[in-house]
Image (cartoon, grey):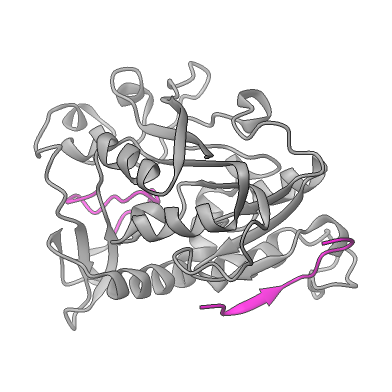
Amino acid sequence: MVTDVLGAPSSGTHLMSGVRLDGAVTSSADLRSAGYRDAGAQESVRAGREWWDANAAEYHHEHGADLAGRLVWGPELLDEAAAGLLGPVAGKDVLEIGAGTADSSIWLHGQGARALATDLSIGMLQRATVVHQPRGTEGATCESGSPSAASLPPRLACDARVLPFADASFDIVFTAYGALPFVADPERVHAEVARVLRPGGRWVFSVTHPVRWAFPDDAGEGGLTVRRSYFDRTPYVETDERGTVSYSEHHRTVGDRVRELAAAGFRLVDLVEPEWPAEVSRAWGSWSPLRGRLIPGTAIFVSQKL
């Protein structure tokens, strides 16, 4: 369902420890319980929207410097400018899912792409307006006609499982850690991406490497010992004092992801497992140099619509 539109085209168109994919540490005061249990499609979507709306400012404060001015695929900071996983983007219609503060789409806009940023959370997209406005214009907005409208691609709040676009609208669709880890029915996302892509279009997405599910979410040595079955797909769920789901993550194996793509009509072109760069010495949540040297933290699936 479409929630809101921000901006307009300038022309043409886990976890038991309380440390989650977002890198935030959960206070015991914020939830009643955390553990593994079923979480339905609708409650997962609602929880995701509400959580990211509430935490948009904090998330950007924590990670904004690493994301600014570029497209990075995960905590290893693999940069699209070097990786080229999307292929040539100039003149292409590009859709970003789970865009957050739209840094990646802004970078693509600067590379000549007709980029459109979407996210379930309007709070995250509104944060883009705040953080990307020119200095000295704190009272301004980034709507069409403002000083920064030309540098911000259009932003749309919507559910990735029900994309509000016509068939065959885009050449490229991508997400860096968006949508897929937070939905109970990822096959719907893949089906929608296939629908809005043109024949031969590219679908690229990064997620926490599935093998990480077997390890505790600990950046230190405690995160190097298997504690959980890789094949256990029970979601990680946090609930509030009313017992309502307030946060959820859904695990899929590598094989699950490959089969999801095939079922939606995609051909897997590449599976990238970024190594931890020697020059990055700080951790991002439970992603750390120690763990990154030994086990993969991110999986990037590069696929093409048949």
Position of 70 with respect to 137 (left or right) is left
- From this viewpoint, is residue 304 visible? yes
Q: Main secondary structure of the magenta part?
A: loop
Residue 63, how many percent across, how many down? Answer: 53, 47
Q: Is residue 109 above or below residue 42?
A: above
Residue 242: image location, x then y, percent = 18, 83
Identify the residue at horizontal 46%, vertical 34% (top origin). 267
Looking at the image, is 139 positioned above or below residue 189?
A: below
Judging depth in this view, the residue of 256 and 39 nearest the camera is 256
- Residue 25 located within the stretch drawn in magenta: yes
Residue 213 figure quarter: top left
Q: Nearer the viewer, residue 169 or 250?
A: 169
Q: Say whether residue 197 is left or right of residue 260.
A: right
Residue 90, by quadrant, is top right
On screen, residue 127 above or below 72? below
Q: How many marks?
A: 0
Of 90 and 47, nearer the camera is: 90
- Residue stretch rendered in magenta on the structure: 1-26
Could you tell me residue 271's position as x and y percent? 42, 27
Q: Residue at x 78, y 48 (%)?
A: 109
Residue 75 makes an appearance in the image: no
The question of residue 39 being in magenta is answered with no
Identity of the residue furthest to the bottom in this view: 242
Residue drawn at 35 percent across, 47 percent down: 263
Q: Is residue 246 above or below residue 265?
A: below
Where does residue 114 sit, x and y in percent of width and height? Answer: 77, 52
